[in-house]
Image (cartoon, coloured by chain):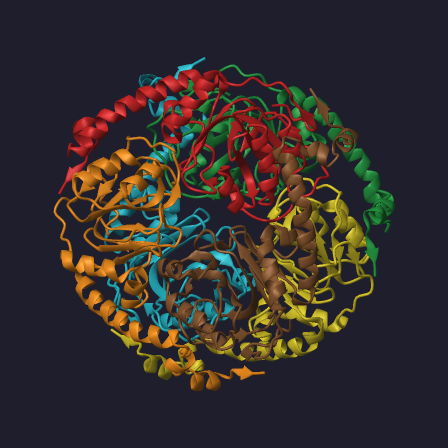
Chain colours: A cyan, B yellow, C green, D brown, E red, F orange
């Protein structure tokens, strides 16, 4: 992640295998994040514009100036089926970078959503289109088209490093990034975790306690827990 | 906007033509804000208490002390059909100034909603009544009735100047104010903008790129954008 | 509320009468808070993970280290039918302390929800289960199980003191705590208040003004309100 | 405050009498704000970059796009001796719009400071120059020079309406605006207030209580205060 | 901490032994907080108005409505030598409840400072008087005197429970509360801790590592730390 | 930046040439950030604990769990003369990870400061030691030593990617990171920029306007700026 690559568009990026991406989406954000050692979450201030959306997709990254959405138009050309735009401004902005016209264009290219550390607008139309967006703000503030940024360079979005082609998993719990090269391995771990949880869920639902299932009582006593 | 007008109620305010107000509501917040040169938005922390509400209305403004909702009762008497209350405390407050009883009274006068740079409560009932409120917070904290404020003076609400009788447009994207005297002109510009967008939406949906529709490639190259 | 009681689990706590708890739930947060002199609200940043939930329950309190959810497992064993977990970390955390597995366990014990001055995850499943949570954040961030906290000691949660066995009332307006020993008296006051509001609602709906119903005009004039 | 005046520079603005401005500065922010009925304060998040600065000055107002400081250069030409720049971006920005070079230019014109609802940088040099700035943030983030704003139009800065030529009083307590036309009257009230406070300060220092000096005991008892 | 005690002034409160209070002040906030098991800190948003102040004092607590400072006058009468006012509004407020006149009165009674989960003003004069205040905000906003609160009841201030007579320790690191009944024991533990730190400081200054002084290497290896 | 490297300590990292690091420190944060295309700033919420500190240093990075400072002890062993610790928790924390004992140890190894996206304590002693810290919060809250993190892996700190060995420049304006491999080139550009600023500062001080020095008038007119 050089500091020198402003004004650059990287055209050919590698993406993870589509079946892996879809597998991760089915596992969900919380499980995927656990499966890679509790890493990869974007900040919890990113919230979906409507409940129930759930995606797995390959990141097309966008670095933009505050209040300037010119580079989204550049980025759309790089979108392929199954991609998601991931945008971060170079300094804080809650302006409405993205709305229904751009969403129409993204969808026409096969894009499946947007993650944006800034604002979004036209959210009623986006909801009707079922084009999910995870954003820092809902804000109608318009943007200009004056200054270059870059497309498909590594960016920091909502506190997490996202490389172009990394896998984005997003649902009602938030957004998680998985390194492209590690995606298959993480999927395997996530599935193992889910399998283990199924059994535990049944036991918990039957009234068994986590204290017993996870064998915690001895360690708690050693740490000094007192019942009074 | 004098500093001396505390404890004042202005009874006769001018309002924009009803057809203009309704026309602006149909255009929506994002479009209206663009049509007046990207001005007039209230801060994006104002959020609707339920999704899907969309209003255009004339502002009855209320300046209140923190934690004191006495002046809302005074303001309700000034409400006419098609009005919306716009309230700002003189210093920060997230107390619950407005609830279902006041909403019942507002509706009985023909009022259509509330914009409040503070808190609101009874939101389940307000939702059932379909009485939309755009607020800074949902908060049950009660308020007192001890200190005067003013009704129908210019106020700053969520960072924007609102004069009594100005047009308020509010929807899922937030809240926008339009000067009463400029409302007809803004409506015209907004409709022009919408007409232009329809054509673009069709082209974008068909897969054409914004880069081409808006003829951006040459300017991007001049600024130095490099494809690698 | 001693400073010395870390690592303690209090097993036998008193709870309010179930009919009183349910009565308070029916009154709702705003009314209950008014009925006890505008006290008892938890901070308004606590928000429900889905709209429409409404509970009254007895508090099982949990004090936890930041990022460590071990004590929730200890607390679940103390849950009886009609209880709600109330959790506060000893310093700020928005980590996802609570998810669907723990919710399954809470439900199996008869618990009815969670109030948490931190994060929650698996919110789609929690919504499907209709297990309401009022939280500071939605966040998938996992937690560890390394350090003791305490269960059923007095805690400060979202700015309010909550004792074990206190009554928690929570709905779309937020969360309110009622002292166990005062619950019956507060319920009586709340019901009196509701009865009074019914009559006022009808008069307001008929177009009568609060200015007249509450006889405010004279006091306003004495304070110096001027109509212009 | 029209919505239509973007890209405008108003050259000839009226200013308050210099002796009035200086008199207000000597009274200080808290007293001036009280003298005009507790109005006129800018939001408390504006903080001075160093302690001890205290100014009274006439406002040269600047409306700027987020992250674009071009209009400050335009504004500096309009600065006369005793002026202060007051800047607000049209949407949130904490970028560093102002630094030591611009400060050098402001000082060369006789300007005495800056109030900015955004960021400032080079604060060590500004402190050495004794050029006070009240800002929302200290932030080195650079800005562009691409988009027009306006100079000397009414703006909302940190929640308060500021007209060109209004008097700005700023010190360690924050920033207050006084309408130009009301400045002489406010000064008189502020001086009256200060005179009254001197006598009270002596009595309080001698151990007399505010309860007695302000004759509060009877009213407190009437409201129901109980001593136990 | 009943919900029913609004409008109450408790006159006779017990205080900790003066030598214990002063001993705790000398230990400082960080050490005292550690000595009582990492408990008792008020939220870190409370900041001193000037650097270098350090106090130990007995709490005179004040519960106030938002924007109403009437009860401070009531509280001052209850102040004895070595006391500190601790104020919390019943809902959020950053108004300037406290300034130089009240500070003069507090000092005349022997009071040594103020902890306030709201705003303070006249901070230049307070600094000159060396009257320390730990506050949430610096804000000149004036307050009214209309509604009762209470004095010397248990309050929650900045997230911590403070009982009247509890010991407050405050310095550049923030504010900590110690239960009156536990103060002597905490002082002893704090002094033991300081003694232990002196020896460690010398060893660390000589270049020895915490890894060795605290014998951490084995436990780190067991947890799986890998050096590459 | 793999997701898999938890519990890792990288011992041998490369550092930039000491003369380059010192040269960058002399240029200061604002200039260095401009010299690398307005990139590299850490978020402006990081503030120095005392005014006037200014450092250039090589980053020893630390990834820690929330509320757990164990890895700082591990990191200190990796500190060489001229290094600075750069710490980021894996989820939000404002706990006081760092205080005077650790600072003593860092200094004994030749370390020159700390950048921490969390809290710091003992700030009076740190100030007396002249050990600068740029932090998100001042907070006395203690931390535990239970869970592994990593040392000298790439981290995201306050929104910026920091690799071990990258150059950190920090002063009153905030904190900037420069890639180790680009440090010499950035220094050269920064010095060029400073040379250019010297001449401009003299002209501005003499009363010349930026409008003329930077030849802005024609471009402003083309964009449509109107003087009225």
Q: Is residue F207 above or below residue E7?
A: below
Residue D16 falls in image quadrant? bottom right
Who's the residue at 28% across and 63% down the image?
F32
Q: In which quarter of the image is residue A71?
A: bottom left
Residue A74 higher or lower than A57, as above or below: below
Vertical position of residue C228 compared to residue E203: above or below: below
Query: Is residue F193 or residue B23 the one in the foreground?
Result: F193
Name the quadrant containing residue B150: bottom right
Task: Inspect this view and state whether residue B127 appears.
Answer: no
Q: Is residue A228 left or right of residue D215?
A: left
Q: Nearer the viewer, residue B207 or F133?
A: F133
Q: Where is residue D81 in the image (x, y as percent from the top left)?
A: 52, 71
The residue depicted at 68 percent of the width and 25 percent of the height is E8
Q: Quadrant of the C terminus of chain E?
A: top left
The residue depicted at 54 percent of the width and 57 percent of the height is D170
Out of F202 and F188, give the one closest to the viewer: F202
Residue C54: x, y in percent?
62, 36
- At a point 57% along the width and 38% down the height, the residue shown is C43
Q: Is residue F85 visible?
A: yes
Q: C129 left or right of A12?
A: right
> Horizontally, is C10 left or right of F88 in the view?
right
Q: Furthest residue to the top?
A: A228
Q: With respect to residue F117, does E166 lie above or below?
A: above
Residue F206, percent from left and from top: 38, 76
**Across the whole image, how many numbered discs are drawn on residues?**
0
Horizontal and vertical percent position of residue B152: 75, 60
User: In the rendered view of the protein, which quadrant contains the N terminus of chain E?
Assistant: top right
């Amino acid at each position: 992640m050089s500091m020198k690559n402003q004004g650059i568009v990287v055209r050919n990026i590698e993406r993870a295998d589509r079946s892996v991406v879809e597998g991760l989406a089915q596992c969900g954000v919380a499980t995927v994040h656990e499966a890679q050692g509790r890493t990869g979450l974007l900040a919890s201030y990113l919230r979906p514009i409507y409940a129930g959306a759930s995606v797995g997709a390959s990141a097309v990254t966008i670095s933009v100036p505050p209040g300037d959405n010119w580079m989204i138009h550049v980025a759309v050309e790089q979108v392929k089926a199954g991609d998601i735009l991931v945008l971060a401004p170079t300094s804080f902005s809650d302006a409405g970078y993205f709305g229904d016209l751009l969403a129409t264009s993204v969808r026409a290219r096969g894009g499946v959503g947007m993650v944006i550390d800034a604002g979004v607008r036209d959210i009623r139309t986006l909801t009707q289109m079922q084009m999910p967006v995870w954003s820092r703000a809902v804000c109608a503030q318009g943007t200009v088209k004056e200054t270059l940024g870059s497309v498909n360079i590594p960016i920091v979005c909502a506190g997490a490093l996202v490389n172009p082609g990394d896998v984005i998993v997003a649902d009602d719990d938030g957004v998680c990034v998985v390194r492209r090269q590690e995606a298959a391995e993480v999927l395997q771990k996530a599935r193992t975790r889910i399998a283990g949880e199924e059994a535990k869920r049944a036991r918990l639902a039957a009234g068994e306690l986590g204290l017993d299932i996870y064998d915690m009582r001895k360690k708690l006593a050693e740490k000094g827990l007192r019942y009074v």
